[in-house]
Amino acid sequence: MSEGKPPPGGKKEKEKKGGFFEKIGFTPRTTKERERPGPPISRSSDQLSLESEESGIEIGVPITELTDQDIHTEFENMLDDMNLTGEEQKKRMRQLPMDKKKDLVKQYMKKRSSTYQSGHGLTKPSEFIHELRKSFHITDPHLLHVIESLRVCLASNPVSWVRAFGADGLEGILLTLEMCYDYDLKHFDDPSYKDTTIKIQLECVRCLKMFMNNKFGIQTTLGRDDSLTILARSLNPRKPLVMIDTLKLLAAVALINHHKVLEAVTVSGELTNQFRFAPVIEGLAIDENLTLTAQLKPACMQFINSIISSSDDLDLKLHLRNEIIRGGLKEQLPELEKVENMDDLAIQLRVFHDHKDLDYEELQHRFGDIKVELDESNVVFDLIQNSVQDTPCDKQYLSILQHLLLIRDDAPIRNHYFRLIEECVSQIVLNRNGLDPDFHRKFELDVDIAIENIVDKIHQEGGEESEEVKLKLESALTAQQEAEAKVAKYEEKLQECEGKIKELKEKGSGVGMDCSPFKPVARPAGPPPPPPPPPPGPGGGPPPPPP
């Protein structure tokens, strides 16, 4: 037993207990009040009396003398005592005729009366509380009998019985569990203890399950600071049967109060000096008993899904999932995927992956929101600077900035550098659907995909501009081809002209040279032109007269 708690049979701290009950609107009777005998009452079918002080009806009044309003009040108490989970069920019950309600109330009071007045064995809550406070040795068979009988009573009796058992009974169950833990530390290697103590521990966990199967039991359990921590210490892979029921109970409670369960698992891990989810990971690796394995593995995955998904905080969910993955689940998942004929395990694995994908999508949406809302570099820089300042990662952050200063001062090249760095950072931060990288091994960065993404972005961003440039280039090429064709034609004509000129030079120069390539312009028809004048005579005189 832990220090600071009263030994079995010691006095209760009633003031502490009463304060909690006042918060939930219930004032339990003391043990003496519950055991105080009332006036002798006839137990015939027509003379059943009300014994519940919560109804506000005078004790000893026969049911035949009750008014319709009294029957209605006791009927509502019966509905609450039946622990009906849905309002629809209560609605159908309330629609019953008054005669039927009277019959049900009569049966209900008769059963309740026999429960509290029976003298055969342990039946009253006060009797169980008294037995749990006795100084039993943990191996005493009588203690096992008491715990087994308590589980049956908690499961079969109405909520009023659980209320009477109350916080005092809960303390007795938790003290018995602590006795089991203390005995384990001292005698776990002793084979003679296993049959008895494991059964007692299993029955205690089942008693807690039955006790918490109603609103009052849940409130009472969660109202005690150490109740779930004591329960979490039953997460022991060496006791698979106990661990199965503990995992299922904690997984259910996590849906109601995630913080309490996470705190209980954390404190339990600190008490044993181990990783807080280590027992769950070890439970996934057990393959000794096929029957137990078929129950333990799904229970472990169910608890993992519950402890991760029950939180509304995305950062906490990512943190818990990554913590469990790094703690050993990463190595277990491939083996669990190969297991056959375990439908429950397959369902839990599918739930694990589905929630992981949903969280990754939410993380991507958050990144999109960051890009939209934090669109100024100086604001982002200040946020990062404030988050890493005076922390161990401050040096690495400074080193990253110093490396960025080494990028060449070339605008196009710098742009490609930063695109590549952006893709690499994206792969690291948004790695594997939101899971952290394995920091104990070499991180593999797919640079080819990063470069392909850069090329795609370039094409996407410059698509319209590239199309326009392409059209201009095609037009320029067409114009060039047309110009080249014209030049070739002119060169051909030039060669012809040069050839003709060469022929003329070979024949000589003069007026009568053949200028066929340059044909004279045709003159209009008319009289022939006059003949040229005769050449001058000898001696420079006038030419002789014509003959």
Image (spheres, rainbow, N blue to C red):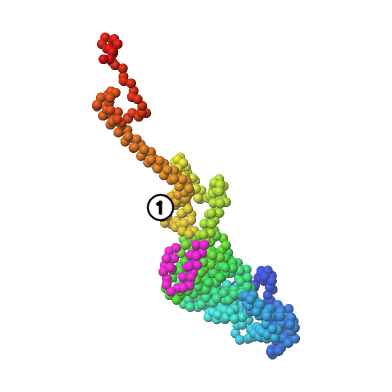
439 magenta-colored: no
Residue designated by label 1: 448
Task: Using the image, determine if residue 17 lies above or below residue 37.
Answer: above
The residue at 57%/74% (across/down) is: 208
Other residues around mark 1 within 10 Å, as few (<14) / some (14–19) / many (≥20)? few
Q: Position of residue 244 (x, y in %)?
A: 50, 73
350 magenta-colored: yes
Q: Position of residue 371 (x, y in %)?
A: 54, 51
Dominant secondary structure of the residues highlighted in magenta in the image: helix
Farthest front residue in view: 547
Q: Is residue 302 visible?
A: yes
Q: Which quadrant does the C terminus fall into?
A: top left
Q: Give the residues in magenta.
A: 330-358
Q: Position of residue 18 (x, y in %)?
A: 68, 71
The residue at 51%/77% (across/down) is: 199
Task: Using the image, determine if residue 507 lies above or below residue 394.
Answer: above
Q: Which quadrant does the N terminus fall into?
A: bottom right
Relative to 75, is 181 on the left or the right?
left
Along the viewing direction, whichever of 450 and 452 lies nearer the viewer? 452
Q: Position of residue 388 (x, y in %)?
A: 53, 49
Task: Using the image, determine if residue 478 lies above or below residue 41.
Answer: above
